[in-house]
Image (spheres, grey):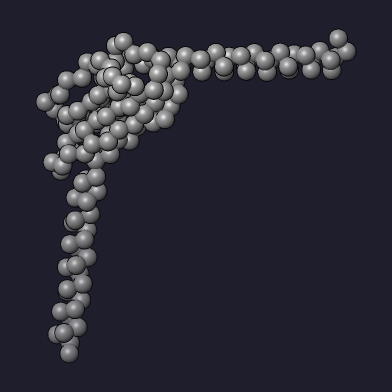
């Protein structure tokens, strides 16, 4: 009976050690985009001169395209020999509009991961924000003058 109990304890210990050894491999297996600039679903007022991608570890970026409505925007993307965690791709000729960035990478585990995100360049966004800001300041100035008896 004692030998069966010892075997059971040894078996559970081996199982626990196996799980601990597999955990880092599972954690590395999931390549993900952690951050982009412009961010996902961002509305920016100035067309970006470049797009930044930050991954959760070194990856080899094998695809990068910026799609406008009905056309691909030019970029200076070139596949690099070395894996990196961050990429900055110049995007000359960007203009106002809705864009989708399609990307694909090969992760440290050798698997290819592809995904996309979108953003919008709206030059009127700043004008709306400025107009609202000026109206807010004018409103405060008006109330301030009334409160001081002017």
- Relative to the observer, which residue lies in front, 34 or 98? 98
Q: Which residue lies furthest to the left in this view?
A: 81
Please say whether residue 59 is visible from this viewpoint: no
Q: Is residue 15 above or below residue 42?
A: below
Identify the residue at horizontal 21%, vertical 61% (top origin): 19
Q: Give the image quarter of residue 132.
A: top right
Residue found 23% across the figure and 25% down from its top: 64
Which image quadrant: the N terminus? bottom left
Is 67 drawn above or below residue 35 in the view shown? above
Locate residue 24, reporting x and y percent: 21, 50
Residue 28 in sight = yes
| On screen, residue 13 above or below 117 | below
Based on the displayed image, in which of its 4 quarters is residue 28 positioned?
A: top left
What is the x, y in percent for residue 30? 24, 45
Query: Residue at horizontal 55%, vertical 13%?
Result: 127
- Closer to us: 16 or 128: 128
Report x, y in % for residue 37: 36, 25
Instruction: State which quarter of the image contains the C terminus.
Output: top right
Q: Is residue 117 left or right of residue 44?
A: left
Give the side of residue 125 with respect to residue 19, left or right.
right
Name the residue nearer the viewer: 144 or 19.
144
Q: Residue furthest front?
A: 70
Name the residue located 64 percent from the left edge and 13 percent from the top edge: 134
């Amino acid at each position: 009976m004692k030998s069966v109990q010892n075997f059971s304890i040894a078996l559970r210990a081996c199982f626990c050690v196996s799980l601990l050894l597999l955990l880092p491999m599972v954690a590395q297996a999931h390549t993900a985009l952690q951050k982009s600039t412009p961010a996902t679903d961002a509305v920016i007022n100035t067309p970006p001169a470049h797009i930044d991608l930050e991954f959760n570890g070194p990856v080899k970026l094998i695809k990068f395209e910026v799609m406008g409505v009905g056309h691909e925007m030019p970029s200076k993307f070139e596949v690099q020999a070395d894996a990196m965690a961050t990429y900055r791709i110049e995007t000359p000729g960007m203009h106002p509009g809705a864009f989708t960035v399609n990307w694909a990478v090969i992760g440290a585990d050798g698997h290819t991961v592809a995904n996309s995100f979108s953003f919008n360049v709206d030059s009127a966004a700043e004008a709306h924000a400025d107009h609202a800001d000026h109206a807010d300041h004018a409103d405060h100035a008006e109330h301030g003058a009334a409160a001081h008896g002017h």
